[in-house]
């Protein structure tokens, strides 16, 4: 019998990680992605024992990896009684079936399923749990084919199947019915959420967005002294958290949203659409970036592409480069003149040249946080005056001068 995908604190499950270096993915990138996959596994409470990497032009159609590499993986997991094998890319139903038949008594998991399990573990609200459950069923449906060698056998049971219906067809019908039920439930929850958002229409709305584990929750907690969960793990926040805050007596709503990640399952994006509406309907986005990460620019691209997918790419956006306290200068050969920025000052000059209002902070140490507050206040107060132009007895520029902020030239 297969080992269950649940565990106790006394018995931590173990895993090996598998990834391919292909024509489109260098060995260095594959190593980096395996590190991220190990972090995902750790977030779920799974201990990584070993990583396997293979260079192939494209995934093997039968086993994803080559036969020789599969034998190497099989020998290791049997020798060390490893609980699961986690692949960094999505597996087809044929891959799962063939791997399952070759590597006995082990869980075969791909990246999407791992992320779905983390989301299920983290989800706290009824809406988030429903969204994740829907995404799980949508993930399962196309992978049912070939998962059971006995799927052509008939199964009895009144009300379970029609004449001649196979077990596979029955399972597909059950899952489709469950998906339909969850979609209706989510639609009802989404309407309730829309009503709540409608009641906030006359408030300035700001949403924190970014790659997972960049410090969005820490920023929210520091800005508003709010009791918001923050942890150095991926997807610490799954449920959107909305807080009413004030900056210099100007009220606004700040939303902490789920973090994005490379290869985020499409089913999750679709299922979390109502949650992501908090981003779509925001007046201002704070795109938080972990500048200490070597691949922060790739992370920015992932976030920008996801924003484009959900229709929020054109939103006003403030770049917030976080974790400057963890940034380490890069070293390049002295003869290599054409290289990326190597120091924090060089990075600042580069990005401030592109976007003068980008800000560099450490949310943990509150470094440069007052500068961040000023830039944020300037943007929020401008939006506030657009909603309530006659609310105060003085002009917007007077308000900025009162708070030590440089005024804009009058047109």
Image: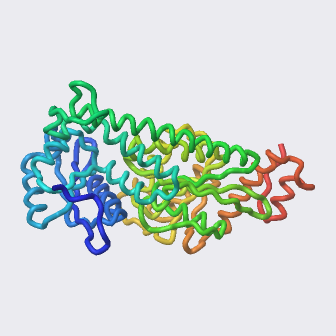
Tell me if 197 is positioned left or right of 7 in this view.
right
User: The C terminus appears in which quarter of the rendering?
Assistant: top right
Q: Quadrant of residue 161?
A: top left
Question: Where 236 sits versus 299, above or below?
Answer: below
Which residue is drawn at the image coordinates 19% and 54% (left, top)? 53
Q: How is the image coloured?
A: rainbow
115, 337: nearer the viewer? 115
User: The N terminus appears in which quarter of the rendering?
Assistant: bottom left
Q: Is residue 397 visible?
A: yes
**Coordinates of residue 256 in the picture (x, y in percent):** 57, 57
The residue at the far front in this view is 158
Q: Is residue 57 visible?
A: no
Which residue is drawn at the image coordinates 6% and 50% (left, top)? 68
The residue at the far right in this view is 393
Which residue is drawn at the image coordinates 74% and 63% (left, top)? 247
**Coordinates of residue 124 in the picture (x, y in percent):** 49, 59
**Coordinates of residue 305 in the picture (x, y in percent):** 47, 42
Numbered-mark total: 0
Question: Where 396 sits versus 248, above or below?
Answer: above
Tell me if 235 is positioned left or right of 198 in this view.
left
Question: Where 170 sits versus 229, above or below?
Answer: above
Which residue is drawn at the image coordinates 54% and 57% (left, top)? 288
195, 176: nearer the viewer? 176
374, 337: nearer the viewer? 374
**Coordinates of residue 265 in the picture (x, y in percent):** 38, 44
Q: Quadrant of residue 398?
A: bottom right
The residue at the far top in this view is 163
């Amino acid at each position: 019998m297969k080992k269950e995908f649940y565990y106790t604190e006394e018995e931590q499950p173990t895993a090996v990680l598998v990834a391919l270096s292909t024509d489109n993915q260098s060995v260095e990138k594959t190593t980096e992605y395996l590190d991220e996959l190990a972090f995902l596994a750790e977030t779920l409470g799974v201990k990584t024992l070993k990583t396997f990497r293979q260079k192939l032009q494209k995934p093997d159609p039968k086993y994803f990896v080559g036969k020789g590499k599969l034998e190497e993986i099989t020998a290791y997991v049997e020798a060390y009684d490893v609980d699961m094998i986690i692949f960094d890319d999505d597996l087809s139903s044929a891959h799962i079936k063939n791997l399952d038949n070759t590597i006995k008594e082990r869980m075969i998991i791909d990246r999407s399923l791992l992320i779905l399990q983390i989301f299920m573990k983290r989800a706290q609200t009824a809406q988030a749990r429903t969204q994740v459950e829907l995404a799980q069923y949508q993930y399962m449906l196309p992978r049912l084919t070939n998962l059971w060698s006995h799927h052509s056998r008939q199964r009895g049971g009144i009300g379970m199947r029609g004449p001649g219906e196979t077990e596979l067809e029955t399972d597909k019908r059950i899952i489709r019915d469950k998906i339909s039920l969850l979609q209706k439930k989510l639609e009802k929850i989404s309407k309730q959420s829309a009503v709540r958002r409608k009641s906030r229409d006359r408030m300035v709305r700001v949403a924190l967005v970014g790659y997972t584990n960049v410090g969005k929750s820490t920023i929210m907690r520091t800005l508003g002294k709010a009791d918001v969960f923050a942890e150095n793990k991926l997807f610490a926040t799954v449920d959107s958290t909305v807080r009413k805050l004030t900056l210099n007596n100007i009220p606004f709503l700040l939303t902490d949203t789920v973090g994005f990640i490379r290869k985020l399952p499409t089913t999750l994006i679709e299922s979390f659409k109502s949650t992501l509406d908090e981003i779509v309907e925001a007046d201002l986005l704070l795109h938080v970036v972990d500048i200490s990460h070597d691949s922060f620019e790739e992370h920015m691209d992932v976030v920008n592409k996801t924003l484009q997918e959900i229709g929020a790419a054109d939103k006003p956006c403030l770049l917030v480069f976080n974790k400057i306290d963890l940034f380490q200068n890069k070293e390049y050969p002295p003869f290599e003149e054409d290289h990326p920025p190597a120091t924090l000052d060089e990075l600042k000059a580069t990005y401030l040249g592109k976007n003068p209002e980008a800000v560099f902070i450490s949310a943990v140490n509150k470094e440069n946080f007052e500068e961040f507050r000023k830039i944020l206040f300037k943007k929020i107060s401008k939006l506030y005056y657009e909603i309530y132009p006659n609310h105060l007895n003085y002009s917007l520029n007077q308000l900025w001068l009162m708070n030590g902020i440089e005024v804009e030239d009058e047109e």
